[in-house]
Amino acid sequence: MASDNFRVCPTTGLKVDFSAQTLIKLNAFTAIVFLLVGGLLGLAIVLTRWQAVHLLTAELFYRALTLHGIAMLVAWIVFFEMALLYFTSAILLNCRLAVPWLGWLQYILMLVGGAIVTVMVLTGNADVMFTSYVPLKAHHLYYLGIVLFAVGAILGCVTFFATLGIAKTEKTYQGSVPLVTYGAIVAAIIAILTLAHGAIFFIPTWLWALGVIPMMDPETYRLLFWGFGHSTQQINVAAMIACWYAIGTLTVGAQPASEKFSRSAFALYAIFICIASEHHLLVDPGISAAHKEWNTGYFMHLAVLASMMHAFSVPAQIEIALRKKGYTKGMFEWLKKAPWGDPAFSSMVFSVTGFGFMGGITGILYGTEQLNIIRHNTIAVPGHFHATVVVGTTMAFMGITYYVLPLIFQRQVAFPTVAKLQPYVYGVGMWIFCIAMMFVGGFGVPRRHWDITAAESLFKGELSFGPTVDLGFAVVAIGGVLAFVGGAMFVLNAVATVAMGKKVNQ
C-alpha cells in the first residue's frame, strides 16, 4: 500500500517516506562500504604489529593506520548515524522528511569529503594518522575533505531536527517522542557540538596547509582536536544505546522499565559526556592540575553514571518482557529462553557486555590522571577503544541492520544461517582481540609504533619485551583474524541481501 510520497510497512504499520527511505539506503550502504575498507586495513595492521608476520613496510603501516582510523571511527559510524537519524525521525514518527534536498546535500558533501580523504591517504599525501597533530602536515585537500564531511554531517543533523519540528507541528505522533528517537536527539546534539569542533580547528589547519596562515599552536590544536576526535565516540554511545532499546523492542517486545529513568540517563550524556575528551590531554602542560583532577575525578563520572543507568535499564527491560512471555522458572529461565538465534539480539548482547565490561570499566580506569600517565601511549588504549567502538557501537549497528534490511530495503536477509553465526564469530574475535591487546599493553608496548623492537631506530640494538608479549601478539592476531572473518560475513550478507535478497511482501 503506497501513496505518492509514502508507503506503509506491512510489518510495523509505519508510514515510510520515500525520500527518507532513499537517504537511509544510501547512507547505510556507504557506511558498510567504509566498514569493509576499514576492516581490510585493520587486518593488515594486526598482521604488521604481530612481529612474526610484520606484513607492511613502515610507510604503508602508517598510511593504513591513518585511513583505518578515519574509515572506522568517522566514516562508517557517522554515515550509519545519518541513516539512524532519518529512520528515528521520519519513519518512527510517521511523517515526511523535512527539506529532502538538504538531506541529499548532506550525503553528497560527506561522500565527496570521505572520497577526498581516502584518495589523499592512499596516494601518500596524508601519512599523519588519525590525530594529525601539528606540525605533522598533510596535503591541504585532506583537511578540506574532513571539513566537507563535517559540514555535511551537520546538515544531516539540521534535517533531523527540522523533521522533528514537522512531526510535532503536524501531530504525527502522540505524547512524547519514542525513547529511541529521544536517544537520537541526544546523539544529534552531541554530533553538532563535535562536528563544530572539527570545523573550528580543521579550517585553520587547512589554511595553514595552504600557506595562508602560520601554524596553529600545538596545544590549542590538541585541545580542539579531541573535542572532535574523542567526542565522535560520544555520538556513537548515544546512538548505540538508542539501538539497544530499539533491538529490545523488535526482538522480544521489550519496553523500558522506566522511561523517565532512561531519558534522564540520556540527558546526562548530553550535558557531561563530552568532558571525557580531555583525558587525552592529562599529561599536557597547558592545562592546570586542578582542572585535570576535576575533569577526571568528578565531572566525567556523571557521564559514567548515565552508562550505569542504561546498564540496569536495558537488561531489565529484556528480563521483564521475557518473564511476561511465561519464562519464570528460577532466576534465569528468561535468559536461557532468550532469542539467541536472532542475530540482532545476540549482537546487542555482545554490544552491551563488551561496551560495559571491557570498554566502560577500562575507560574509567585509563581516564584517571594517575593511570593515564602509565597507560595512555601503550597498546592497551587501542584495546580499550576497540571494545567501545567495535564491540560496542559497531555490533549494535550490525544488530539493527538485520531489521533495517527487511524494513527499509524490503529484502529478506540472503543467508539467514550466516546471519545467526556472524555475531558470535565477530564478537568472540573482538573479545579475544581487545583483552589480548590490553594485556600486552600492560608491558608497556607502544600503541602506534610500526616495529615494537625499535629496529631501524636510533636505539643501539633492538628492544625486547620477552616471549610473553610475543605470545600475546599472536593471540591479538588470532582475535583480529577471527573478527575480520565475522565482519566479512556481515558485509557480504548485507550486500547479497540488497543485491539478490527475496523481496518482502509489499
Image (cartoon, rainbow, N blue to C red):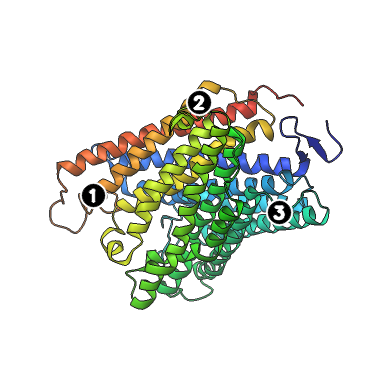
Could one spot residue 123 in this view of the protein? no
Q: Which residue shows up at 16% across the image and 58% down it?
A: 459
Could one spot residue 423 in this view of the protein? yes
Quadrant position of residue 159: bottom right
Q: Is residue 296 above or below residue 393?
A: below
Give the foreground label among 2 and 1.
Answer: 2
Residue assigned mark 2:
341
Q: Earlier in the sequence, mark 3 or mark 2?
A: 3
Q: Residue furthest right?
A: 4
Packing grade of label 2 (10 A; few <14, some 14-19, many >=20) is some
Q: On the rendered structure, is 310 left or right of 94?
A: left
Residue assigned mark 1:
452
Give the foreground label among 3 and 1.
Answer: 3
Relative image position of residue 217 (x, y in whole percent): 43, 75
Q: Earlier in the sequence, mark 2 or mark 1?
A: 2
Q: Residue furthest left?
A: 461
What amino acid does circle 1 point to? Ile
Q: Which residue shows up at 29% across the image and 48% down it?
A: 438
Residue 176 bears which disc, if any? 3
Give SS at disc 3: loop
Query: Mark 3 and mark 2: span between their CA atoms?
Result: 33 Å
Q: Considering the image in quadrants, where does the N terminus appear?
A: top right
Q: Earlier in the sequence, mark 3 or mark 1?
A: 3
Q: Which residue shows up at 23% across the image and 37% down it?
A: 52
Residue nearest the viewer, comparing 147 with 181 = 181
Q: Report the number of numbered marks.
A: 3
